[in-house]
Amino acid sequence: MKILNYGSMNVDNVYDVDHIVRPGETINARGRHRNPGGKGLNQSIAVARAGGEVYHIGVLGADGDVLEQALTRNHIHADYVKHVPGSSAHTMLQVDKNGQNSIIVFADEAITFTDTEMDEILAHFVSGDAVIFQNELDRSPVFMQKAADRGLTVIFNPSPMEDSIFSYPLDRVSWFIVNEIEGGALTGETDPEKILDTMAKKYPAAGVVLTLGSDGAWCMRGPERIFQPAFPVKAVDTTAAGDTFLGYFTAGMLAGEPLDRVLRRAAKASSIAVSRPGAADSIPSRDELE
């Protein structure tokens, strides 16, 4: 089974700060780094490091050398990466001394795919293959519909959570992987069990993974519910925590492994990632976990 990721790739400009800057405030950063990032790329790297075969769809600008190197270094298939003139998407991240972060994303309007390009890519994949989506790459709802029509397993991480999420064909999603903010926005609930109850009613054909940070994670598939506690660590940078969890969960779930084992491995990988600085570079390999 092949895993396709229609996902963002960003050049991350990371600033180490004592606290997240407040409105009207000027502060000095303790450090600055330029790293490969973007939810899509982070998730593809996590899938690859978990042992999955992943094909990334994304866009590289003329300044995307750090992104191209990340794809190559992590053995991610880049056949469907589109090269465009101008700059790649980029982000500005603040990471405070407790590892919490704030993120601004900017993607140029040229970062998009046409219907023809989508159809040509999907022609190489068959029913049973899987595709991962976030809400960062343009025209994702169109690609999701096309992928679902071809019988691909659709895995959706609705982030960033905006009103545009409800323009997606959510009834075609096979797995929702959400945090409590995203789950709450989809359901109108705040309690984790009520979020799961409402998701089950609204999207009965879909499985749900609800991540709760240091409070662990829930997985629901049909009547089955599994709780996975978090592994306690000192957080240094939480930027790629959810992406690491998603990548490890996706690789293990699609390989047919028992869900309790998959969840434990995903939680362990995520805990290691938050104990390190950076996004993509913080994601551990499966060999390291074992």
Image: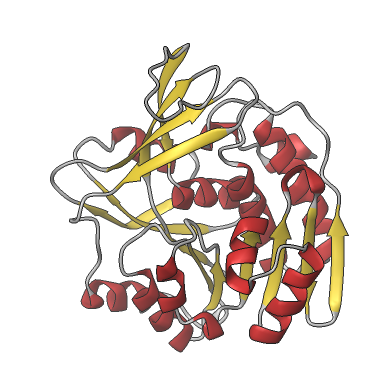
Q: Quadrant of residue 66?
A: top left
Q: How many marks can you see?
A: 0
Q: Residue at x 64, y 64 (%)?
A: 184
Asked if 96 appears above or below 107 in the picture, the reply is above
- Indicate how the structure is coloured in the image: secondary structure
Residue 115: give x, y in percent of width and height. Answer: 24, 77
Q: Residue furthest front?
A: 24
Viewer can see residue 231: yes
Viewer can see residue 177: no
Q: Quadrant of residue 192?
A: bottom right
- Who is closer to the viewer here, 187 or 1? 187
Residue 227: give x, y in percent of width and height. Answer: 86, 60
- Who is closer to the viewer here, 156 or 126? 156
- Who is closer to the viewer here, 209 or 78? 209
Q: Residue at x 84, y 82 (%)?
A: 223
Quadrant the N terminus occupies: bottom right
Q: Residue at x 53, y 84 (%)?
A: 172
Asked if 6 appears above or below 151 in the picture, the reply is above
Quadrant the C terminus occupies: top right
- Who is closer to the viewer here, 20 or 208? 20
Residue 19: give x, y in percent of width and height. Answer: 54, 22
Residue 49: give x, y in percent of width and height. Answer: 61, 45
- Left or right position of 70 against 215: left
- Left or right position of 63 against 230: left
Asked if 248 appears above or below 197 in the picture, the reply is above
- Left or right position of 44 against 191: left
